[in-house]
């Protein structure tokens, strides 16, 4: 027997993770069903018909709760999907928050437009009713295909999915964490994969180490506060924000930075932090030990969580230096764009980019050196200092990805590099071929391959 793999979306781009495995007995399994993010062309692509009939899908396995991995699930349900949705417990909890939040963003953006929303509240509710959870290492079956979730170390509850049929093991990595991470255990090692469908976001780059990134962050804070400026940090609400809070907590409590106003200005990030508190058992051992000693790693002097719009609007009136952490991480929505609109024209401002900036987003424009950007219809000159720290990425870098593949070098038949810009995916594929001698391809969207 053999499995057919279709790269529905997620090949040739970072976002829109969505892959289909089909067995000869009719079992059809999706891995992820994420939103395609970036410019308007990608937003339109989210409305195109799926590359398969949703009503024929047996199950959907979700690697983790980032929007580009879960954002089209309610639409899948709307289009007729009635199968099982499977993930870890934290992924289910965070995904519900993310989907409801995304729906609110869509409602705001659709005002005055004729097009329907991608999905509605009933679609989210029905998706959650289909959703079941399993633990890491718990084995199960979807039709004729066995599966197991392994810890990807990317965000809380993130998983790799290992499928097995007739002695052939196929692993979808989802997104792989930048281990060692402050909060999470290291990515599980896999020694016996035959086929690997792996992410390649940073397939052509190497991150700073954790010690380097912390030192750089301290320097940036001190330099910005010396100018009584605002340090703006566009942050993804899941994991990046919680890691930042963890490190800022350590800096403040150990006196490495002064007590200054630090605003977590994101209702979603605040809610997700609550999920992190709920699922502490998924933290690494050192963080669990720290919490058991009485340290609340998400609360420290100076931190203010601004849930309401009025609280957010009041932040600019606070005189003196401050740090503002707000979504979205690519500045393509959320509260951060309002702060950028007010502050990017000031030389005392520092904009710190700590996450991947997809092509077509405001964050990418600024990172690429734009001198003037359009924010909410206003032309804003960029006079702020712009700094990027890639070491805060929740993704493995090129060296980490190669090491991950190396563990299965003796058993791998083929590697497929997906979830990356073409330049990154091709660089990683060449690195795997050169260093490990394993056949490696960079598939295109819509490609089908036989795994046998």
Image (spheres, rainbow, N blue to C red):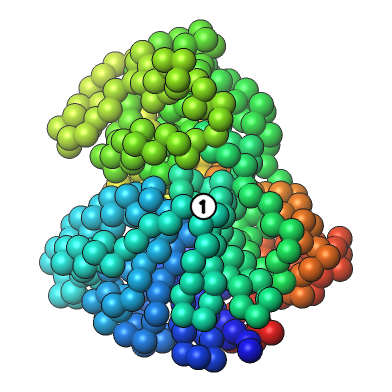
Percent position (x, y) of residue 266? 29, 38
10 Å neighbourhood of mark 1: few (<14), some, or many (≥20)?
A: some
For the point 46% across and 80% down, the residue is: 143
Closer to us: 422 or 144: 144
Q: Say if 437 sits above or below 66 in the image.
A: below
Q: Say if 45 sits above or below 410 in the image.
A: below
Locate residue 412 relative to residue 196 in the image: left or right: right
For the point 67% across and 42% down, the residue is: 207
Q: Say if 269 sits above or below 434 in the image.
A: above
Q: Is residue 77 visible?
A: yes
Percent position (x, y) of residue 255? 51, 8
Locate residue 206 relative to residue 141 in the image: left or right: right
Instruction: Quadrant for residue 195, please give it.
Output: bottom right
Percent position (x, y) of residue 307? 21, 34
For the point 52% across and 22% down, the residue is: 289
Quarter of the image that includes the N terminus: bottom right
Instruction: Quadrant for residue 35, please give it.
Output: bottom left
Closer to us: 229 or 24: 24
On the image, numbered disc 1 is attached to which residue? 136
Closer to us: 336 or 199: 199
Instruction: Quadrant for residue 3, please give it.
Output: bottom right
Kindly state the secondary structure of the residue where label 1 is placed: loop
Quarter of the image that includes the C terminus: bottom right
Locate residue 445 relative to residue 329 in the image: left or right: right
For the point 15% across and 32% down, the residue is: 310
Q: Is residue 430 visible?
A: no
Locate residue 71 relative to residue 127 in the image: left or right: right
Closer to us: 114 or 67: 67
Percent position (x, y) of residue 118? 25, 71
């Amino acid at each position: 027997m053999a499995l057919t793999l279709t790269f529905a979306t997620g090949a040739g781009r970072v976002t829109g993770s969505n892959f289909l495995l089909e067995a000869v007995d009719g079992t059809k399994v999706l891995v992820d069903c994420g939103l395609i993010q970036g410019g308007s062309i990608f937003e339109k692509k989210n409305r195109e018909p799926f590359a398969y009939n949703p009503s024929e899908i047996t199950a959907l396995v979700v690697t983790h709760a980032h929007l580009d991995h879960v954002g089209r699930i309610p639409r899948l349900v709307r289009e007729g999907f009635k199968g099982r949705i499977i993930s870890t417990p934290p992924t289910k909890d965070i995904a519900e928050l993310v989907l409801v939040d995304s729906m609110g963003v869509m409602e705001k953006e659709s005002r005055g437009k004729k097009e329907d929303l991608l999905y509605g509240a009933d679609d989210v509710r029905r998706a959650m009713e289909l959703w079941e959870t399993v633990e890491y290492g718990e084995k199960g079956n979807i039709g004729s295909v066995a599966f197991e979730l392994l810890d990807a170390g990317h965000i809380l509850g993130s998983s790799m999915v290992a499928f097995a049929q007739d002695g052939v093991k196929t692993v979808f990595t989802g997104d792989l964490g930048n281990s060692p991470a402050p909060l999470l255990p290291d990515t599980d090692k896999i020694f016996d994969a035959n086929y690997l469908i792996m992410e390649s976001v940073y397939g052509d780059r190497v991150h700073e180490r954790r010690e380097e990134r912390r030192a750089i962050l301290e320097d940036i804070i001190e330099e910005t506060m010396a100018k009584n400026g605002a340090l703006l940090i566009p942050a993804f609400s899941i994991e990046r924000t919680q890691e930042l809070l963890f490190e800022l907590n350590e800096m403040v409590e150990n006196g490495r930075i002064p007590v200054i106003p630090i605003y977590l200005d994101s209702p979603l990030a605040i809610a997700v932090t609550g999920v992190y508190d709920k699922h502490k058992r998924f933290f690494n051992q050192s963080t669990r030990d720290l919490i058991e000693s009485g340290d609340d790693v998400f609360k420290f002097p100076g931190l203010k969580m601004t849930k309401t719009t009025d609280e957010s609007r009041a932040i600019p009136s606070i005189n003196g230096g401050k740090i503002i952490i707000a979504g979205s991480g690519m500045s393509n929505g959320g509260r951060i764009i309002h702060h950028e609109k007010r502050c990017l024209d000031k030389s005392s401002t520092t904009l710190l980019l700590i996450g991947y900036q997809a092509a077509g987003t405001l964050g990418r424009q600024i990172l690429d050196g734009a001198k003037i950007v359009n924010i909410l219809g206003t032309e804003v000159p960029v006079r702020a200092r712009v700094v990027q720290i890639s070491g805060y990425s929740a993704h493995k870098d090129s060296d980490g990805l190669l090491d991950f593949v190396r563990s299965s070098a003796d058993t791998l038949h083929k590697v497929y590099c997906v979830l990356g810009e073409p330049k990154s995916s091709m660089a990683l594929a060449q690195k795997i071929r050169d260093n490990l001698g394993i056949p490696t391809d960079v598939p295109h969207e819509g490609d089908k391959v036989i795994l046998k």
